[in-house]
Image: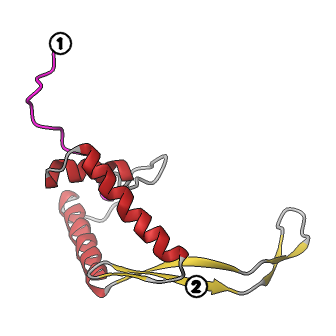
């Protein structure tokens, strides 16, 4: 069967945290770079190579900024902050031997109040819809 060359592109698979709610799942769904490329292709109108270059450039700038020791703030989304952890004692749970966990630098993410509110509202909407789907009854 020959595929129509001029058919509109398929809509990309978009991360939907509610899609598997309540059902066991093998892994947590993730928004991947490939999915971002497909979204830019479908929604913004970039071709795939432009979309891929844009996604790669964005993450390269973020990596370079964090490697240089600077924090990143994305308005309306959140901030990526560097945090230095001090050395601390640790224990291997299997062998029970003590050792020192070395000092290291980690990246933390802090969501803006706007993002937190959007997530909260989406969660409330999801739970309201679930309740409606069950006819307002609590599960057994």
Where in the figure is residue 27, as x and y percent of width and height?
Answer: 48, 50
Residue at the spot of label 1 = 1
Residue 15 can be seen, yes or no: no
Q: Secondary structure at mark 2?
A: strand
Q: Secondary structure at mark 1?
A: loop
Which of 132 and 107 lies nearest the eye of the viewer?
107
Q: Which residues are magenta?
A: 1-19
| CB within 8 Å, label 2 to label 1 | no
Where in the figure is residue 64, as x and y percent of width and height?
Answer: 48, 71
Which of 43 and 132 lies nearest the eye of the viewer?
43
Q: Between tags 2 and 1, which lies in front?
A: 2
The CA span between labels 2 and 1 is 56 Å
Horizontal arrangement in the rendering, residue 26 relative to residue 123 (left or right) = right
Q: Which mark is residue 83?
A: 2
Where in the figure is residue 60, as x and y percent of width and height?
Answer: 43, 63
Q: Is residue 93 above or below residue 52?
A: below
Quadrant of image for the N terminus:
top left
Secondary structure, magenta segment, majority class:
loop
Q: Is residue 16 above or below residue 119?
A: above
What residue lies at 30% left-to-right and 87% top-to-bottom? 113
What residue lies at 26% left-to-right and 68% top-to-bottom? 127
Horizontal arrangement in the rendering, residue 53 relative to residue 43 (left or right) = right
Which of the marked residues, 2 or 1, is nearer the chain's N terminus?
Answer: 1
Q: Please, which residue is most extreme toward the top here?
A: 1
Where in the figure is residue 15, as x and y percent of width and height?
Answer: 31, 55
Which of 76 and 69 lies nearest the eye of the viewer?
69
Q: Quadrant of residue 84?
A: bottom right
């Amino acid at each position: 069967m020959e595929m129509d060359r001029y058919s509109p592109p398929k809509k990309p698979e978009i991360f939907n945290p509610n899609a598997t709610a309540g059902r066991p799942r093998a892994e947590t769904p993730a928004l991947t770079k490939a999915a971002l490329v497909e979204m830019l292709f479908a929604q913004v109108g970039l071709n795939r190579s432009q979309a891929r270059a844009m996604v790669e450039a964005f993450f390269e700038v973020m990596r370079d900024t964090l490697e240089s020791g600077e924090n990143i703030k994305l308005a309306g989304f959140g901030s990526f902050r560097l945090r230095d952890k001090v050395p601390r004692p640790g224990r291997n749970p299997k062998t029970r031997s003590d050792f020192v966990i070395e000092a290291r630098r980690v990246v933390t993410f802090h969501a803006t109040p706007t993002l937190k509110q959007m997530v909260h509202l989406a969660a409330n909407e999801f739970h309201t819809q679930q309740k409606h789907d069950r006819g307002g009854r609590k599960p057994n």
